[in-house]
Image (cartoon, rainbow, N blue to C red):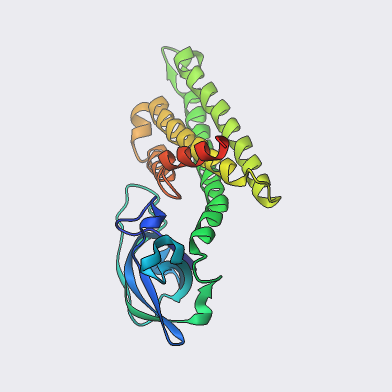
Amino acid sequence: MAAYALTEPNAGSDVAGIKTQAILHGDKYIMNGHKRYITNGSVSSFITVFALTDPSKGARSLTAFVVPTNSPGVEIVSDLKKMGQRASVQTEFKFHDVEIPIDHRIGGDGQGFLLAMKTFERTRTGVAALSIGNAREAYETSKSWAKNRIQFGKPITVNQGVSFMIADMATEIEAARLLTWNAAWAYDTGQKTANTLSAMAKLLASDMAMKVTTDAVQIMAGEGYSTEFLVEKMMRDAKLCQIYEGTNQIQRLVIGKGVIK
């Protein structure tokens, strides 16, 4: 298992605000710093850590390193207690004079910012796909339940108030799925639009998933709010997809820069 350590207590969407340092001393780097919200952190064997090799140059010296989790000086502070997605751990790390051989550097010195941005082109599309799968399950669960829920002698799906919600859910899921496929195709084929499309897919799909899962709870009313049918869990899980890999507000900035040239 591997982890990807970019985020810090004071550097989330602002990657240029990273303060963790890895200073070259002879044939090794010495790393000191603090990372937070690192997915798979405490269960990983290796971490890709982004750090500054020359703090005077700021983000221009950002560099990526492979750091074994059991290296002396790597401190696992704690795992975050989360609202949702509890099957995945998010970990806080501190690095105290961790020695890193030069051959553990990924790419060249100062290439970390580019590597991080290129990684987002792929991972944001993955978050979109996760969002769609979550939304589809909430949609199917609530639709099946509604077709069998009898009120006033009829299934509640005969009411436009419910059937229109289901119609919107199906339409929004399909639209997000097609955009996500397009973003994945753009990345796989090296299109110049890959970065913009991945941000679009992540934005649309995660917002859609939050809406669809919330509507699923609403359709199922008290049973949706209970833990019996798991749609409440899907709603809690959906929220994180609007936050990680860059908040959806940041996605709008990325998209704006991509389309206004």
- The image shows residue 222 at horizontal and vertical percentages of 33, 29
Q: How many marks?
A: 0
Quarter of the image where one finds residue 80: bottom left
Can you see residue 205?
no
Q: Residue furthest right?
A: 189
Q: Is residue 116 left or right of residue 194?
A: left
Residue 54 vs residue 152, the one in the foreground:
54
- The image shows residue 221 at horizontal and vertical percentages of 36, 27
At a point 41% along the width and 39% down the height, the residue shown is 249
* Above or below for 28 versus 80: below
Q: Is residue 211 left or right of residue 120?
A: left
- The image shows residue 143 at horizontal and vertical percentages of 51, 28
* Above or below for 137 versus 65: above
Q: Residue furthest front?
A: 56
In the rendered image, the quadrant that contains the C terminus is: top right
Quarter of the image where one finds residue 5: bottom left
At a point 35% along the width and 57% down the height, the residue shown is 17
* Above or below for 10 versus 165: below
At a point 56% along the width and 55% down the height, the residue shown is 118
- The image shows residue 69 at horizontal and vertical percentages of 41, 75
Can you see residue 244?
yes
